[in-house]
Image (cartoon, coloured by chain):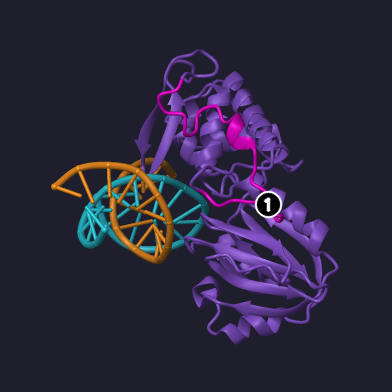
Chain colours: A purple, B orange, C cyan
Amino acid sequence: MPELPEVEVLRRDLEREAVGKTIREVEVKLPRIIRRHKTKREFVDRVVGAKITRVDRRGKYLLVSLNSGDVLVMHLGMSGRIERATPRKALEKHTHAIFRLRSGADLRFIDMRQFGELFVTHADGLEGVRELAHIALDPLADSFTWQVFSDIVTGRQAKLKSLLMEQKFISGIGNIYSDEILWAAGLRYDRVSDTLTSQEMRRLYRAMQEVLQDGIRHGGVTLDDETYRNLHGKPGEFQQHLKVYGREGKPCRRCRSTIVRHRWGNRSTYLCQQCQV
DNA sequence: GTTTAACCCTGCACGC
DNA sequence: TGCGTGCAGGGTTAAA
């Protein structure tokens, strides 16, 4: 499931491959994927003929700016990905939208579970989009300082995992990375935020930055049952470096005790009960 | 204010 | 073999 690092890897790929290119034609094969628009035409007409000027990321959203003043917003949901392909290449199953570039290449939006979506909005209206407006600072942004982090953590009485995953607090962290960050910080998912010592808070802040950067460096996580790939179809490698996520029954890489899985909310949470306190 | 559960969806694992 | 069921999860929303 694409979280900040996976989306960031894709953003960098798109920046290299798509900026400066003009969209010649768009084919929407599954209208559900543009469910925010009333008709296919409304979506297609705003995109066709536009040149891609830049690619940004806000949380898990990709923002593809067009020279028309519009922004093509992409969210990958749980199983979405974007692939660059030659038009001759056969369409993969679950290909829901195809952007044909004037340069000859295709950008294909593929999403098995259909939780992802695409929509176009004017750049000025971006803040009016509910899902984007509430997204907090990016944890890797320079402005996301230790002080900002500490203020939010101490100002709340929430369990750490839900804080980390709350997009209006920190953007871009999902189930996998929150478990990895908490393990790296040596903290349990159900610790209440305002009980942290300043030393623990520093560890959490540092762990968050390091784990996310590591994830990007290794091209993100591609699990066996998942479909995440970079723009060129290459899987990530960070799954080989995961310390707790998906490692139920295996020894903790720090203290050798057994990693356990807890059911928390609707999600699986993995932790080492020995070294996370 | 915070937590929980349901919802959207498909593929897969499992039990009968 | 084939069917039904449960699970996985991001983000939103409603209810507790």
Amino acid type indicated by mark 1: Asn
What SS does tag 1 mark? loop
Check disc 1 and report the residue beneath it.
A230
Q: Residue furthest top?
A: A255
The reply to whether the magenta stretch includes residue A196 is: no
- For image coordinates 51% across by 33% down, the residue present is A179
Q: For residue A148, what is the image quadrant? A: top right
Q: What chain letter is assigned to the residue under label 1?
A: A
Whether residue A253 is visible: yes
Residue range highlighted in magenta: A226-250
The reply to whether the magenta stretch includes residue A229 is: yes
Total marks placed: 1
- Is disc 1 surrounded by few (<14), some (14 to 19) or many (20+) residues within 10 Å? many
Whether residue A191 is visible: no
Q: Position of residue A96 (x, y in %)?
A: 56, 71
A62 vs A194, nearest the viewer: A62
Q: Position of residue A214 (x, y in %)?
A: 69, 34
Up/down of B16 relative to A253, above or below: below
